Image (cartoon, rainbow, N blue to C red):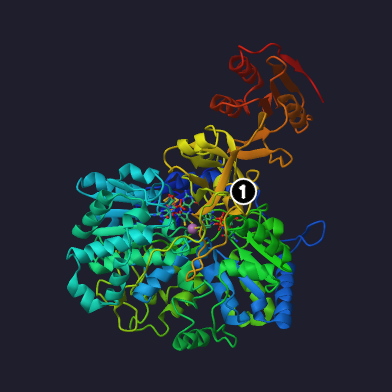
């Protein structure tokens, strides 16, 4: 799929929109990126993160070789010995303690082929279902909601429906920042159709509200009450689609009963009757409604019920399976959907087949020719780490996820990994909080190096293609897993030579026992792709009955047949219940957490782009002005946020976007990019009882301003450890990093301390102290007549200071000196330049 002028078609590394893009290496070695106009997810559009992908393929911090960290000095290993060590250790533990003593924790950032092989090894050959994915933190409640309602984990929608809908409702979704290209498509559709409406349901005001006709800032965790109110309204005002409900659904009465018992929806949700009536009327009287929902729904102790409360509303009016209508769970990661397809969650088997179905067990067992198939579900992510902390799981293999940062109660995760006898981590980056806990670290190929398929939110399978060579010894995840499987004695089932072979096997499994459409997921049209077909594969939306050579837009359930035993959809009776943790006198504020526009998760990739760092350059907490006043917090000041679990240090962003007494901290910064800025340090490991998904958006906390005396900016070409300072956060800038530092010490003490970190061997150091009593210190080291490092210390920094430091870095020394003059002209008392060596 390389064009004559060198462009290679591939798929974006980030979100579940799954945008097609084209990449090409310039003569300078840089990677050029542009949107793929022919790709049906984005038709050429890309967002800031997609556009900046070229910045992130640099080799800074890359993991290059398998490493054994068990000895005091890490030892580099060959692939042969690394995979042998893992195979031996896993085999020994399994023999001694049984298959359930080992586990895999995998990720929606693996390719389908990687995912398939990991699931096959774990469930099919080791014989335990202790394989779970970070999708547990992301999609698990939606999976439960779909399976309860439809009998299958089916997203019925295609993106076109968002454009076709007359009303689009965003529930707990900041689409503008998290699925930007879908948001662009929605915005354009709204511009073209002035009667189209958008409603945002989110306790927080987000950029998604910019195009909203109504924003319902409901109370955190009250979505079930809101949607039960909708169901009652639909029934109470004769808006039910009687024919649809009676012919194609079960349990409508129970669900309605339950909804009608919901007392005082206005009080529970904190919304006015007028707001509620307007929303309900709009939903009930509009034919084409799409309800998009995401982590404000899923990441909750009532996440599964929230999902079903939304689906109930759609079922009541037959609003699904038709153009422009339906409930739409948008997926987060590039291959969250692929992981569900291969079944790499602890409670699913494979290929949308289930443990509780003996036929399914037989199909999978025969297909894999496995003697040792796991017969019951394994441990879900949070329980898996609990079992590790209790010493029950003795070996874990973590792939493409960073649980030290992304699972709740970081302290417990640290203890679990500490207790676990043998921790293997496959990643692309050498230094993450999780690789720091590993016994064996394995270098995996990352985006642009790896090759395979991913499935996006509308069930569309696209190829990720290799565009760059792999650095060091990096290998594909499927290859690494297969090597270990072979060395564990399962060679016959894992002798793959190419990812295309794995895909064909995955497609073939989807067809087993599924010739009459018994299951939703079928790739029957892709079972006999040859290598060339696979290499040239165009986007395919499943179910794939025949190879799609043109874009198709299919929606499921158009035939009103569902995958339940009687082929009817289920209403699920749900009731609002309060989130598991409540505020108290000691912890009176509520912490919400989520994403910013230009960073991705734990920043291992986006953290390498200077332009992406400009949007939000430091960890922050959104605080309402009234709350800020009450706690004596100024905008821009560092604050400490505490819960019963831990504490976190972030900069106050005082804004009316959050409600009084509500805080919001982004998930991205962690101990690699800042000191103590992780919200998961504070978050309780409470989960939805059915889905096992953690409650990330509702944590009782307290707040106090930090009392720091001095602040510094430090520019460097290399990563520096500033952990002995009270606060630091790292920002990527062109050719290096900018560190934001604060301290309890005086300005002069901090200056003295940080001066030690300058690398003097690069020739001259310019030093300048100014202000009465030396309240402002400035230093630059110089190499080849250019600024090599900079240090600026004073009581507090302004945006101007920061901008100036960034510009100063890498400047010609003469310009930099002039810059200093300009910048501090009024306070410069003395400008001395001296040479140190
Ligand atoms: N820029 C960027 N984009 C991403 C990612 C990223 O890291 N960065 N990650 C990707 C991934 S894996 C995912 S899962 C998606 C997540 O995408 P989203 O779910 O859209 O993102 P979040 O910011 O986690 O949460 C969405 C909103 O839920 C709201 N919310 C909190 N509590 C409640 C509640 O009780 N009810 C309701 N209705 N809303 C509530 C929050 O205020 C927040 O604005 O984004 C994907 N896209
Ligand atoms: N407080 C709070 N916590 C949350 C959330 C929240 O809203 N609030 N959201 C949750 C959600 S929805 C999600 S999805 C998770 C995300 O959390 P994580 O999955 O922990 O986040 P990432 O930073 O994406 O971690 C991926 C890791 O895999 C590596 N990697 C990338 N590609 C590959 C590859 O091909 N192979 C291998 N082996 N490694 C690779 C990257 O370098 C990186 O270290 O966070 C969850 N945690
Ligand atoms: S919307 Fe998502 S898939 Fe598309 S370019 Fe942006 S991050 Fe990539
Ligand atoms: Mo996610």
Residue at 25% over, 47% down: 190
Quarter of the rendering containing residue 834: top right
Q: Nearer the viewer, residue 373 or 136?
A: 136
In the picture, which quadrant includes the C terminus?
Answer: top right
Residue at 43% over, 70% down: 144
Label 1 crowd bin: few (<14), some (14–19), many (20+), radius 10 Å: many
Instruction: Tell me if the residue at label 1 has its CB under 8 Å from ligand 2.
Output: no
Q: Is residue 256 above or below residue 447?
A: below
Q: Is residue 329 left or right of residue 443?
A: left
- Which residue occupies the extreme front position in the image? 585
Residue occupied by mark 1? 670
Q: Is residue 136 above or below residue 631?
A: below
Q: Label 1, secondary structure: give it.
A: loop
Question: Is residue 535 among the parts visible in the rendering?
Answer: no
Question: Is residue 76 among the parts visible in the rendering?
Answer: yes
Q: Nearer the viewer, residue 831 or 642?
A: 642
Residue 93 in picture, x, y percent from top left: 72, 77
Q: Nearer the viewer, residue 621 or 339?
A: 621
In the picture, which quadrant includes the N terminus?
Answer: bottom left
Residue 227 in picture, x, y percent from top left: 32, 61
Residue at 74% over, 78% down: 92
Q: Is residue 120 left or right of residue 763?
A: left
Residue 575 in picture, x, y percent from top left: 37, 67
Residue 479 in picture, x, y percent from top left: 61, 68
Quarter of the rendering containing residue 408: bottom right
* Marker count (numbered): 1
């Amino acid at each position: 799929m390389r064009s004559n002028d060198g462009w290679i078609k591939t798929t974006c590394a980030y979100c579940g929109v799954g945008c097609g893009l084209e990449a090409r290496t310039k003569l300078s070695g840089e990677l050029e990126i542009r949107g793929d106009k022919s790709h049906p997810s984005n038709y050429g559009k890309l967002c800031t993160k997609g556009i900046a992908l070229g910045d992130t393929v640099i080799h800074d911090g890359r993991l290059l070789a398998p490493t054994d960290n068990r000895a005091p000095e890490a030892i580099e290993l060959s692939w042969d010995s690394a995979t042998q060590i893992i195979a031996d250790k896993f085999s020994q533990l399994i023999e001694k303690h049984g298959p359930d003593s080992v586990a895999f924790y995998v990720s929606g950032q693996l390719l389908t082929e990687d995912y398939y092989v990991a699931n096959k090894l774990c469930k099919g050959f080791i014989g335990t279902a202790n394989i779970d994915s970070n999708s547990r933190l992301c999609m698990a409640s939606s999976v439960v909601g779909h399976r309860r309602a439809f009998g299958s984990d089916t997203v019925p929608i295609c993106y076109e429906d968002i454009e076709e809908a007359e009303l689009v409702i965003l529930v707990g979704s900041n689409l503008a920042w998290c699925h930007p290209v879908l948001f662009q498509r929605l915005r354009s559709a709204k511009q073209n159709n002035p009667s189209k409406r958008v409603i945002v349901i989110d306790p927080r005001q987000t950029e998604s509200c910019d195009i909203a006709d109504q924003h319902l800032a409901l109370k955190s965790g009250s979505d079930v009450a809101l949607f039960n109110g909708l169901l009652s309204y639909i029934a109470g005002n004769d808006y039910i689609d009687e024919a649809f409900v009676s012919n194609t659904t079960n349990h409508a009465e129970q669900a309605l009963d339950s909804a009608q018992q919901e007392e005082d929806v206005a009080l529970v949700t904190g919304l006015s009757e007028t707001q509620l009536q307007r929303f309900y009327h709009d939903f009930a009287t509009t034919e084409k409604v799409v309800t998009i929902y995401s982590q404000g729904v899923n990441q909750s102790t009532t996440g599964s019920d929230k999902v079903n409360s939304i689906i109930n509303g759609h079922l009541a009016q037959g609003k699904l399976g038709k153009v422009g209508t339906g409930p739409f769970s948008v997926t987060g990661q590039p291959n969250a959907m692929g992981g569900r397809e291969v079944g790499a969650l602890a409670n699913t088997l494979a290929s949308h087949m289930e443990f509780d179905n003996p036929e399914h067990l037989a199909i999978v067992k025969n297909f894999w020719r496995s003697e040792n198939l796991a017969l019951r579900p394994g441990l879900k992510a949070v329980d898996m780490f609990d079992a590790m902390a209790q010493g029950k799981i003795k070996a874990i293999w973590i792939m493409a996820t960073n649980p030290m940062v992304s699972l709740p109660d970081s302290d417990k995760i640290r203890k679990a990994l500490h207790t676990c006898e043998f921790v293997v981590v496959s990643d692309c980056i050498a230094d993450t909080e999780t690789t720091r806990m590993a016994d064996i670290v394995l270098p995996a190929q990352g985006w642009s190096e790896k090759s395979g398929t991913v499935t996006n939110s509308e069930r569309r399978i696209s190829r990720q293609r290799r565009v760059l060579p792999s650095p060091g010894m990096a290998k594909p995840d499927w290859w690494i897993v297969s090597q270990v499987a072979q060395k564990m004695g399962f060679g016959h089932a894992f002798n793959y030579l190419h990812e295309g072979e794995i895909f064909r096997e995955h497609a073939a499994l989807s067809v087993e026992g599924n010739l009459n459409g018994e299951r939703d997921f079928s790739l029957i049209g892709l079972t006999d792709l040859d290598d060339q077909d696979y290499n040239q594969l165009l986007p395919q939306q499943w179910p794939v009955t025949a190879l799609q050579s043109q874009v198709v837009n299919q929606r499921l359930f158009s035939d009103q047949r569902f995958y339940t035993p009687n082929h009817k959809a289920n209403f699920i009776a749900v009731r609002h219940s309060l989130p598991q943790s409540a505020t108290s006198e000691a912890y009176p504020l509520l912490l919400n957490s989520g994403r910013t526009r230009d960073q991705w998760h734990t920043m291992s990739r986006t953290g390498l782009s200077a332009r992406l760092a400009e949007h939000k350059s430091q960890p922050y907490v959104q605080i309402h002005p009234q709350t800020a006043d009450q706690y004596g917090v100024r905008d821009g000041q560092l604050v400490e946020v505490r819960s019963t679990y831990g504490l976190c240090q972030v900069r106050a962003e005082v804004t009316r976007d959050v409600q009084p007494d509500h805080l919001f901290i982004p998930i991205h910064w962690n101990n690699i990019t800042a000191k103590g800025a992780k919200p998961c340090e504070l978050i309780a490991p409470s989960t939805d009882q059915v889905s096992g998904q953690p409650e990330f958006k509702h944590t009782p906390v307290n707040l106090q301003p930090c009392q720091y005396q001095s602040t510094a900016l430090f520019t460097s070409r290399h990563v520096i450890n500033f952990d002995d300072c009270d606060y630091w956060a790292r920002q990527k800038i062109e050719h290096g990093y900018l560190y934001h530092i604060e301290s309890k010490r005086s300005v002069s003490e901090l200056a003295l301390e940080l001066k030690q970190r300058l690398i003097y061997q690069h020739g001259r150091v310019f030093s300048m102290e100014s202000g009465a009593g030396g309240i402002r210190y400035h230093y630059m080291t110089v190499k080849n007549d250019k600024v090599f490092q900079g240090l600026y210390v004073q009581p507090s920094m302004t945006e101007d200071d920061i901008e100036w430091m960034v510009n100063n870095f890498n400047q010609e020394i003469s310009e930099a000196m002039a810059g200093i003059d300009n910048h501090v002209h009024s306070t410069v008392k003395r400008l001395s330049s001296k040479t140190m060596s």
